[in-house]
């Protein structure tokens, strides 16, 4: 165990040491990354004259691939609406040489400082002449000859210099795709105090717009900054693409591992949702983590296998452009299941063209990716198809899956549109959980499945389809609005045996010992919508800038679910446990304000209210035991209604440019599993109260670190119950801990990231009494099961040109590229139910690749040191010895993590 | 302090933190389960008085015992799908040995136990077609209780013997389920041993020896059989005592 950790420490230390030498504020990265675009240049403009000279006004200008201004908005009003309109009207007539990347014109967004000069008294109202009257004009062109194209580079003016510098900064920031950069209010046009900004805004919020928007890929995120600020507390961060792809990824869900405190495991099988741990939460299959992709919420409410169920099997890592993680609750936009936090995935493909990636690997592994990103379209537009198959690393683990993601971004001027389509299907056989004592005794191999038909029949099937449309409108006054609509259909079927042979049929109690193969079926049809409006920047005082946002989200779910016991191999049903139809609705509204008090303090926050309504047709409710005479018919229909109100606020204090002190408090909720509700019950919500405070230190792009302390309290937590294969209540809980997160880019070709998360997670009160345990054991300070106190993640990636071009034709004109990367995950021992602990483990994944022109060959090795580890470990009673005496004492069970796995990949790009 | 030095110091601290965490994280700290000896104590072979003036002298009283489950639920049975501790082996207890002696091991987890359930050596597993003895002792004849002795009342003298099977009525159920008394409830943490106290005199105390046949056999379904089974399963079940630190 120590070897991989120590080896990785050495490599990470190299990156960190390098950052010591190079991460200095006065010495930013020496050059822009290879893909950094060149900024637009002003070719033609015209002066803006006013009666009296005024302070310059900042205008955020979007320039398309042809150099035309497609949108313009004031970063801050002049205070004169007539003048505001005139400024915008004039700026929209400007003509630019478009920004370029690798010689290809691209759209871009820059901030232009437009000076308002006094009109000459002798020539009031007449077009200005060159010279003095145009000194403050936005372009040298305007100064020389309005309406005539000119060389902006030659027509130097202070405004021009500044603008170009800004655009350059912008491009650099965007090329690195570091959304955190937007956290700096000095560079954040979204922040109301951005009127002071002399740089174009780098990346920021509204990723759904980002990816869809300008078609200049990461650069598009500049525009998002104008829509809304990030930085909802110390735990709001964005993981950029270079960090995401530093270490190898075996599947799309691996992108989540890059976030602090996150561990993702696919314990049950390829077609079953991932088990997600986030900052002290065992989020099971998503109950505590809200996840959105392209603006669409993906958690499935009241899912039979787990509340808030998520299966990230559809995700194709190559199309994930960035990952925004809000750990805790601090943003009024966060909705249902945002208990541990929210993850937003932004999709986009920067490398345009047609790409084919074919991978072959251990255990019959095969993956084929076809990714089409049309050159002429925006980075948010792409179509990707992925096929995966494996024989599995042990018995009974073969799987096949296919996934398609299509996103089209279009629109001109003030309007942007996005269409998102997702299709996914997977079927897998499952080895299931095995008893550790059986493995230790040698009766079962570490990667084996039990030999009985009830174990060999374990399998899962998953299908999901999502269609979404979203439109964003940027208003002329700087405000913006958005509306979206989505449809979803999810089908889930699981046959799993967690407990062996301990179940008895309720329907006929003499039916026993047929194997506890639990069959779960869940089908969800969802329709949802969201809309929001954000105001222009108000400036009630010179030191105060404010914006207000209001929005709503709504979803309606129709859920059919059933749970049965099935005897294998006959596949006959020998008991029915659940047969229900649920109709659910969640309508949420919020108001959010963003106040900038001077350049040093920002306050953000608001309140959210969600209304949840359920109608349940529980066809097996009011079950009649066999010993009781029938006096009524089966069935229990009921309805419930509840409201959750959640205030949220955050503060940011920037005593210096490099240091920010951040804090947040928020309340959130998790909706209930509808079938647990009684008729007329005021739907109980798991109420979460979350606070964090910390400090962020940033030295340009080269180094960023944040140290955060956090506290979270839940009114009513749940834990996995293996006998039923679903979640049960455990009572109130509290988590407190700290997070250290560091990202360093000491060279253009090297990136490193490290996160260390500690949590003390406690059960605050005894679990609710049950018939089986009317007085549940409780010890003050009792640790929550499954939660690892320590989670460490480190990523290092390097890529560089190995040799320059050696000719102008054929392959010789292409430089040879190389890249290496590594990722390390460490989980400390974690408590399990019944006073036992799971073993710690350390995983090290490495990759190396060599590219020449359109071709790249790479090798990925996962679990390099072949650690034998439990991807997930549980403790419960089972009986996997049908010939022997049944044990009823809880025992450690585990689902094996994958052994060392090789994958070789051939990539061809056209 | 310039930025470079502050950055260096900060980074060094981070590295040190990471290395310390890594070096302390590679230890298996799994908790060992609880394991206790199970002792059994019978009674002396002294004659005792049964109903209707019979004086009984036991010559053999062997009891098959197990499996044994200790539950956290107040009521064992269906509510004890998960036990805190168990002794799965079927053992044979010599009930005429009054000295506590080890007969098996109790394995489980720490926690409070409030009820108990067990079989007398004959178990009907959920996966079984019928009850089966799981005591590996041929002298028990696959039964739960083997008893021999003499009952005397005045001039009457009855030599009796019986091999009684106490079987679960359905698969998965156990023949004895009982809530522990206040003095028997315990937290396994800190317990040193479990002592079973079994008194066969109470089981035979209700037998009408005059109704036994000439051969003295205790036949299934007879009054003697019913009295003994009632004593074993309801009226005089094995007692539990804990030895603690």
Image (cartoon, rainbow, N blue to C red):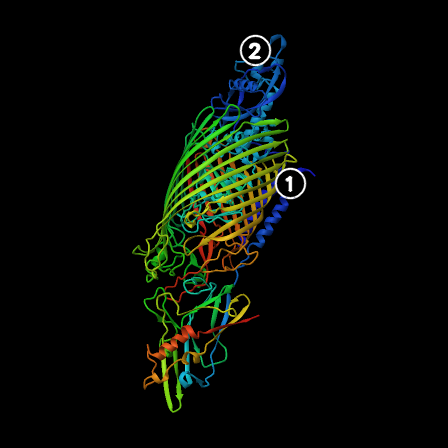
Instruction: Kindly indicate whether the residue at mark 2 contacts the one at mark 1 (C-beta within 8 angstroms).
Output: no
Q: Position of residue A125 (x, y in %)?
A: 58, 10
Res. A112 image quadrant: top right
For residue A492, say whether it is visible: no
Chain letter, disc 1 residue: B
- In the image, residue A596 sits, relative to residue A326, either above or below, namely above
Q: Position of residue A787 (x, y in %)?
A: 52, 52
Q: Residues within 10 Å of mark 2 (few under 14, many from 20)?
A: some
* Residue identified by numbered label 2: A127
Q: In the rendered view, does A226 fall on the left or right side of B172?
A: right
Q: In the rendered view, does A113 fall on the left or right side of B59?
A: right
The secondary structure type at the circle numbered 1 is helix
Q: Position of residue A440 (x, y in %)?
A: 45, 62
The secondary structure type at the circle numbered 2 is loop
* Residue identified by numbered label 1: B7
Quadrant in which the C terminus of chain A is drawn = top left
Q: CA distance from mark 1 to mark 2?
A: 54 Å
- In the image, residue A438 sits, relative to residue B11, either above or below, namely below
Q: Residue furthest right?
A: B1
Q: Residue furthest front?
A: A631
Chain letter, disc 2 residue: A
Q: In the rendered view, does A183 fall on the left or right side of A456?
A: right
Residue A716: assigned label: none
- Say which of B128 and A841 sits in front: B128
Q: Residues within 10 Å of mark 1 (few under 14, many from 20)?
A: many
Q: Position of residue A545 (x, y in %)?
A: 60, 29
For residue A378, say whether it is visible: yes
- In the image, residue A153 sits, relative to residue B98, either above or below, namely above
């Amino acid at each position: 165990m120590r070897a991989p950790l120590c080896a990785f420490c050495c490599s990470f230390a190299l990156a960190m040491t390098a950052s010591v030498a190079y991460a200095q504020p006065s010495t930013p990265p020496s050059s822009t990354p290879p893909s950094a675009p060149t900024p637009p240049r002003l070719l033609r403009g015209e002066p803006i004259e006013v009666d009296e000279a005024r302070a310059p006004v900042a205008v955020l200008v979007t320039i398309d691939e042809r150099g035309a201004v497609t949108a313009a908005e004031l970063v801050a009003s002049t205070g004169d609406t007539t003048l505001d309109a005139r400024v915008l009207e004039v700026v929209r007539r400007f003509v630019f040489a478009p920004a370029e990347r690798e010689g290809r014109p691209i759209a871009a967004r820059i901030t232009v400082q437009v000076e308002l000069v006094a009109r000459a008294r002798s020539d009031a109202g007449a077009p200005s002449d060159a010279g003095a009257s145009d000194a403050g004009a936005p372009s040298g062109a305007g100064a020389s000859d309005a309406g005539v194209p000119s060389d902006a580079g030659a027509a130097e003016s202070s405004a021009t210099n500044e603008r170009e510098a800004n655009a350059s900064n912008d491009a650099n920031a965007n090329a690195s795709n570091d959304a955190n950069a937007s956290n700096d209010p000095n560079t954040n046009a979204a922040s109301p105090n951005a009127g002071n900004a002399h740089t174009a805004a780098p990346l920021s919020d509204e990723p759904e717009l980002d990816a869809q928007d300008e078609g200049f890929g990461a650069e598009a995120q500049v525009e998002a900054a104008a829509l809304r600020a990030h930085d909802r507390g110390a735990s709001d961060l964005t993981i950029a693409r270079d960090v995401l792809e530093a270490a190898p990824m075996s599947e799309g869900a691996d992108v989540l591992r890059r976030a602090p405190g996150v561990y993702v495991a696919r314990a049950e099988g390829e077609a079953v949702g991932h088990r997600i741990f986030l900052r002290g939460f065992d989020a099971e299959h998503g109950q505590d983590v809200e996840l959105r992709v392209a603006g669409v919420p993906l958690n499935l409410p009241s899912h039979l296998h787990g509340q808030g169920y998520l299966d990230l099997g559809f995700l194709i890592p190559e199309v994930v452009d960035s990952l925004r993680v809000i750990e805790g609750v601090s943003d009024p936009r966060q909705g249902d299941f945002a208990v541990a936090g929210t993850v937003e995935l932004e999709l986009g493909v920067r490398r345009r063209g047609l790409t084919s990636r074919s991978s072959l690997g251990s255990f019959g592994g095969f993956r084929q990716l076809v990714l089409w990103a049309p050159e002429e379209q925006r980075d948010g537009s792409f179509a990707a198809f992925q096929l995966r198959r494996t024989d599995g690393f042990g018995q009974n683990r073969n799987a096949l899956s296919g996934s398609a993601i299509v996103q089209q971004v279009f629109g001109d001027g003030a309007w942007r549109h996005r269409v998102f389509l997702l299709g996914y299907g997977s079927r897998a056989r499952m080895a299931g959980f095995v008893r550790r004592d059986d493995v230790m005794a040698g009766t079962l191999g570490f990667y084996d499945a039990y030999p009985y038909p009830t174990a060999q029949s374990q399998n899962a099937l998953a299908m999901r389809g999502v269609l979404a449309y979203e439109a964003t409108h940027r208003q002329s006054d700087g405000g913006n609005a958005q509306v979206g609509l989505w449809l979803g259909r999810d089908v889930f079927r699981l046959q799993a045996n967690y407990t062996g042979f301990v179940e008895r049929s309720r329907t006929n109690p003499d039916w026993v010992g047929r194997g506890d193969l639990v069959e779960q079926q869940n089908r969800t049809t969802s329709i949802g919508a969201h809309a929001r409006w954000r105001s222009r920047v108000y400036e009630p005082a010179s030191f105060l800038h404010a914006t207000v946002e209001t929005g709503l989200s709504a979803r309606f779910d129709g859920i059919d679910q059933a749970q049965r016991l099935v005897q294998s191999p006959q596949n006959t049903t020998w008991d029915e446990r659940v047969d229900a139809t649920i109709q659910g609705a969640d309508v949420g509204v919020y108001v959010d304000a963003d106040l900038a008090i001077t350049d040093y303090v920002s306050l953000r926050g608001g309140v959210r209210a969600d209304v949840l309504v359920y109608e349940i047709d529980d066809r097996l409710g009011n079950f009649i035991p066999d010993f009781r005479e029938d006096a009524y018919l089966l069935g229990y229909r009921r309805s419930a209604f509840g409201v959750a109100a959640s205030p949220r606020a955050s503060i940011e204090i920037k005593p210096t440019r490099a240091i920010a002190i951040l804090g947040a408090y928020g309340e959130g909720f998790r909706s209930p599993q509808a079938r647990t509700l009684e008729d007329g019950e005021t739907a109980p919500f798991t109420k979460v109260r979350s606070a964090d405070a910390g400090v962020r230190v940033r030295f340009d792009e080269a180094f960023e670190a944040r140290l955060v302390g956090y506290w979270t309290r839940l009114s009513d937590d749940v834990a996995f119950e293996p006998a039923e294969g679903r979640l049960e209540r455990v009572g109130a809980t509290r988590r407190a801990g700290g997070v250290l997160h560091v990202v360093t880019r000491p060279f253009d070709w090297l990136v490193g990231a490290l996160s260390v998360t500690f949590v003390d997670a406690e059960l605050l009160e005894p679990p609710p009494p049950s018939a089986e345990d009317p007085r549940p054991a409780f010890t003050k300070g009792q640790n929550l099961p499954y939660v690892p106190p320590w989670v460490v993640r480190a990523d290092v990636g390097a890529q560089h040109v190995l040799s320059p071009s050696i000719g102008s034709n054929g392959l010789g004109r292409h430089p040879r590229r190389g890249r290496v990367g590594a990722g390390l995950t460490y989980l400390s021992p974690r408590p399990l139910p019944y006073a036992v602990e799971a073993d710690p483990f350390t995983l090290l994944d490495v990759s190396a690749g060599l590219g020449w022109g359109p071709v790249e060959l790479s090798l990925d090795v996962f679990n390099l040191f072949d650690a034998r580890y439990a991807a997930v470990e549980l403790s419960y009673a089972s009986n996997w010895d049908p010939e022997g005496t049944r044990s009823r004492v809880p025992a450690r069970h585990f689902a094996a993590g994958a052994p060392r796995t090789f994958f070789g990949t051939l990539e061809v790009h056209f | 302090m310039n930025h470079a030095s502050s950055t260096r110091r900060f980074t060094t601290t981070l590295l040190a933190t990471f290395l310390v965490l890594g070096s302390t994280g590679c230890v298996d700290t799994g908790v060992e389960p609880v394991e206790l000896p199970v002792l059994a104590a019978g009674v002396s072979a002294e004659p005792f008085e049964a109903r209707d003036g019979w004086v009984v002298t036991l010559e053999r009283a062997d009891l098959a015992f197990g499996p044994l489950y200790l539950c956290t639920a107040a009521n064992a049975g269906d509510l004890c799908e998960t036990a805190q501790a168990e002794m799965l082996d079927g053992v044979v207890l010599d009930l005429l040995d009054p000295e506590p002696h080890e007969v098996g091991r109790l394995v489980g987890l720490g926690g409070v136990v409030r009820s108990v359930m067990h079989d007398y050596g004959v178990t009907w597993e959920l996966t079984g077609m019928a009850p089966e003895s799981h005591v590996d002792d041929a002298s028990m004849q696959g039964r739960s209780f083997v008893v021999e002795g003499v009952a005397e009342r005045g001039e009457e003298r009855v030599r009796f013997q019986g091999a009684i099977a106490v079987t679960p009525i359905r698969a998965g159920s156990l023949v004895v389920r009982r809530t522990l008394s206040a003095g028997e409830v315990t937290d396994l943490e800190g317990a040193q041993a479990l002592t079973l106290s079994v008194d066969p005199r109470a089981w035979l105390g209700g037998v009408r020896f005059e109704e036994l046949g000439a051969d003295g056999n205790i036949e299934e379904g007879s009054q003697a059989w019913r009295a003994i089974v009632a004593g074993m399963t309801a009226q005089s079940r094995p007692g539990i005592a804990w030895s603690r630190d």
